[in-house]
Amino acid sequence: MPDTEDPKAVQEPTEDPSKTITRRRFILGVIAGGAAVGAASYHILAPSGHGRSFGGERLISLNVNGKMRRVEVMKQETLAWTLRYKLGLTGTKLGCDRAECGSCTVLIDDVPYYSCSVLTNTVRGRKVTTIEGLAADNGTLHPVQQAVLEAQGFQCAFCMPGFIMSTVGYLKAHPNPTRAELAHGISGNICRCHDYMKILDSMMLGAQKMRTGAPADNPGPQKATLAFWGGDRSTSVGL
Ligand code: FES
Ligand code: FES
């Protein structure tokens, strides 16, 4: 008769955990700006003018995430294009490339803008902040990023950097919004997975973290969200 399995026995992992992509790890990558979500094929689909050199590039200086960057840009080049394909800041996503979805949102002088609709030439002398510039130098996430990580408020996460940047910009001017006010404030962003309730849960938690500088004691709707999903599934949900 075979030995019965000891339910208390520690299960040996079948895979190297460092190589396992969990939902938590994936989302952390996206909100920190480094995950490879998105536009690998965008170069092929880009409108004419993007991605080609017409010999009219000018070397300019840009203040991006607190650093001065020297970059050659075309006069018709958008900020989204420069950030992603000249400076390697691929945390800024390109969804529609026509000012409709908000996935390309960055802060310019602390105000949210669609970077797909801003010419790079026009931001010289201004302060550009992308999703890569939110975390502290020691890696500590911005409170809104941390809230997203804790609340797991997204599906595919493509829209996440844009929503975070819009929320951070909105909260700079409106630090204590109601849920309805915040929803209106970030309504220029679209989630194709239609995950708006969880997105708002995350962003309201982020607002609370920004105000208090501490984890939320009473996350309200976010608590219900976690209950719905069966608690923190971050260590068990793979992608
Ligand atoms: S990519 Fe800029 S608004 Fe959609
Ligand atoms: S979570 Fe997929 S687009 Fe928003």
Image (cartoon, grey):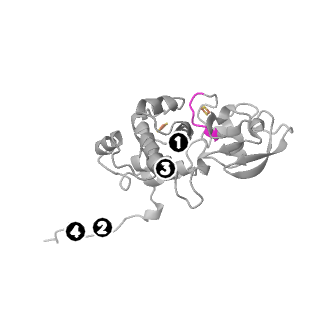
Q: CA distance from mark 2 to mark 1?
A: 37 Å
Q: Which mark is residue 143?
A: 3
Q: Cα distance, mark 2 to mark 4?
A: 9 Å
Q: Residues within 10 Å of mark 2 (few under 14, many from 20)?
A: few
User: CA–CA distance between discs 4 and 1?
Assistant: 42 Å
Q: x and y percent of residue 85 in the render? A: 70, 45
Q: Which mark is residue 8?
A: 4
Task: Please tell me whether mark 4 sits on a helix, a strand or a loop.
Answer: loop
233 in the magenta segment = no
Mark with earlier residue (3, 2) = 2
Q: What residue is shown with label 2?
A: 11
Nearest to the observer: residue 149 or residue 136: 136
Picture quadrant of residue 120 = top right
Please tell me whether mark 3 sits on a helix, a strand or a loop. helix
> At x 74% / y 31%, what residue is drawn?
48
Q: Disc 4 beta carbon < 8 A from ligand 2? A: no
Label 1: state its secondary structure. Answer: helix
State which tag comes first along the sequence, 1 or 3.
Answer: 3
The local secondary structure at tag 2 comes to: loop
Residue 96 placement (x, y as % from top left): 60, 31
Magenta stretch, main secondary structure, is loop
Residue type pointed to by label 4:
Lys
Tag nearer the camera, 2 or 1: 1
Which of marks 1 and 4 precedes in the sequence?
4
Bounds of the magenta segment: 100-107
Q: Amino acid at mark 3?
A: Pro
Please name the amino acid that badge 1 sits on.
Ile
Q: Is residue 190 left or right of residue 90?
A: left
> Which residue is the site of mark 1?
164
